[in-house]
Amino acid sequence: MNRRQSAIQYTAHIYQIYIAAAPEQVWSAITESEWTRRYFHATEFVEPPQPGQPYRTIVADGQPAVDGMIEEMHDHPPVEFPVASSRPGYTLYDPDLEREPPSRVEWTVEWAGDGLTRVRLVHSNLEQSPLTWGNRQRRVGLDSGQL
């Protein structure tokens, strides 16, 4: 077995952060365009996300950013917001990323005590998506500035 064959294959990025805000505030920052424009790469939802429904996010100039499907969504702590792509071409803001297979993003928001909320983001199904993998390493999800 050569060095390349013995390498561990990572297929998910996992981010976890504690934010000094209530879970409801953090949830709003993830799901409401008023907040996503400020805290999530200046993107916004075209329509509010709904469980079992497709969604699209766009960037400031109206160009598409991401298409996906909300698999499930809970509105009480712990809040889970699993999102899975609804079609190949999940990422729309970059033609090279658009050609990669769809990936899955799952947000979990839960009260952590002492005025803190834990946010856990798992971006998975990246086995065949080396560009998305590399892009995630450069762009850590939520900007945890003041909510």
Image (cartoon, helix red, strand yellow):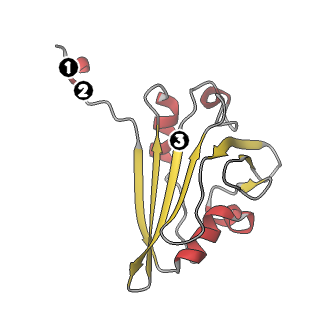
Residue 24 versus residue 97 in the image, above or below: below
In the picture of the structure, the residue carrying the numbered disc 2 is: 7
User: What amino acid is labelled 3 in the image?
Assistant: Arg
Q: In what quadrant of the picture does the C terminus appear?
A: bottom right
> Is residue 65 found left or right of 81 in the rendered image?
right
Q: Is residue 119 above or below residue 87?
A: below
Nearer to us: label 2 or label 3: 3
Asked whether 124 or 96 is in front, the reply is 124
Residue 17 against residue 112 in the figure, above or below:
above
Residue 104: assigned label: 3
The amino acid marked with disc number 2 is Ala
Image marks 2 and 3: residues in contact by CB distance under 8 Å: no
**Residue 76 location (% of width, % of height):** 55, 71
Q: Are marks 1 and 3 in contact (CB under 8 Å)?
A: no
Q: Secondary structure at mark 3?
A: strand
**Amino acid, disc 1:** Arg
Q: Earlier in the sequence, mark 1 or mark 3?
A: 1
Of badges 1 and 3, the one in the foreground is 3
Q: Residue at x 38, y 86 (%)?
A: 114
Label 3 crowd bin: few (<14), some (14–19), many (20+), radius 10 Å? some
Where disc 1 sits, the SS reads: helix
Q: CA distance from mark 2 to mark 1?
A: 6 Å
State which quadrant residue 13 falls in. top left
Residue linked to disc 1: 3
Find the distance from the CA under tag 2 to the CA under tag 3: 23 Å
**Residue displayed at 71% across by 43% down:** 65
Q: Quadrant of residue 68?
A: top right
10 Å neighbourhood of mark 2: few (<14), some, or many (≥20)? few
Contact (Cβ within 8 Å) of mark 2 with mark 1: yes
Using the rendered view, name the quadrant where residue 110 is placed: bottom left
The quadrant of the picture occupied by the N terminus is top left
